[in-house]
Amino acid sequence: MILTYHYISPELLEFYEKSFPRCRGVFVSHTQAVGLDRPHGRVIHNAVRGEDIPYGSGSEDRLIVVGRMVPRKGIAEAIRIARHVDKPLLVIAPVMYNLAESPVYFRDVVAPLIDGKEVRYIPSLSNDLVLQEVGRSRAFLFPLQWEEPFGLA
C-alpha cells in the first residue's frame, strides 16, 4: 500500500510509520520530505498537466484566492490585498475540521472580514468549478505565509 502525504504533520507521519510499517509513504516534493526530517524519503510529484487547465478570459473584475482555511495559506492577507486595491474577492477555502487551527482561524479572523458583497465566500467547489472561477477572475492571489512544499493551487 502507498500513501501520498499531501498535508501532514510530523506527529501524523510518525503515527503512520509506527502503526502501518508495511505502508509505503511518498512525499509530494523533496522540500516536504526535508521539512518532515525525511531527506531521503520517496518523492512522487503531484501531476498537473498544463493543457488540462481551462484558462479563462478574466472577464469578471474580481480577484480570487483558493486554499485550505488555515493561517499559512494567507486567506486574511488576500482579503487585505483585495481591499487595498479596491477589488472584490472570491474566497474558496474549506474549513478543515481535522485541523484544530482551521475553524478557529475562520471564526476569529476570516469570517468577520466576509461581507457577502466585496468579499464573497464559498466553502468548497469541485476542482472543475474552481478552475472555472479562477478563469473568470482578473487575478489569482496566493499570499502564502510559509514555504509551500508543492501546492496544487
Image (tube, helix red, strand yellow):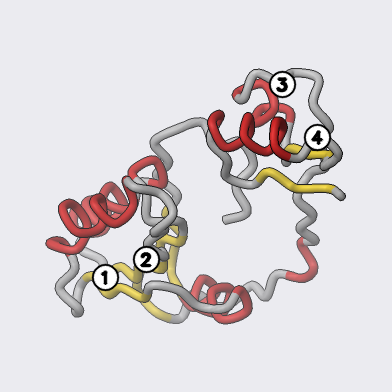
Label 3: how many Cα within 10 Å (few below 14, some 14–19, many 20+):
few
Report the Cα–Cα distance between label 2 and label 1: 6 Å
Q: Is residue 96 left or right of residue 153?
A: left
Report the Cα–Cα distance between label 2 and label 4: 45 Å
Secondary structure category for the residue under label 3: loop
Secondary structure category for the residue under label 4: loop
Residue bearing the label numbered 4: 21
- Identified by mark 4, the residue type is Pro
Label 4: how many Cα within 10 Å (few below 14, some 14–19, many 20+):
few
Whether pointer 3 and pointer 4 mark residues with C-beta atoms closer than 8 Å, the reply is no
Report the Cα–Cα distance between label 2 and label 3: 37 Å
Q: Nearer the viewer, residue 55 or 143?
A: 143
Quarter of the rendering containing residue 149: top right
Residue bearing the label numbered 3: 38
Residue bearing the label numbered 1: 88
**118 lies above or below 20:** below
- Identified by mark 3, the residue type is Arg
Q: Please identify, in this view, whether the residue under mark 2 or under mark 4 is nearer the observer.
A: 4
Whether pointer 2 and pointer 1 mark residues with C-beta atoms closer than 8 Å, the reply is yes
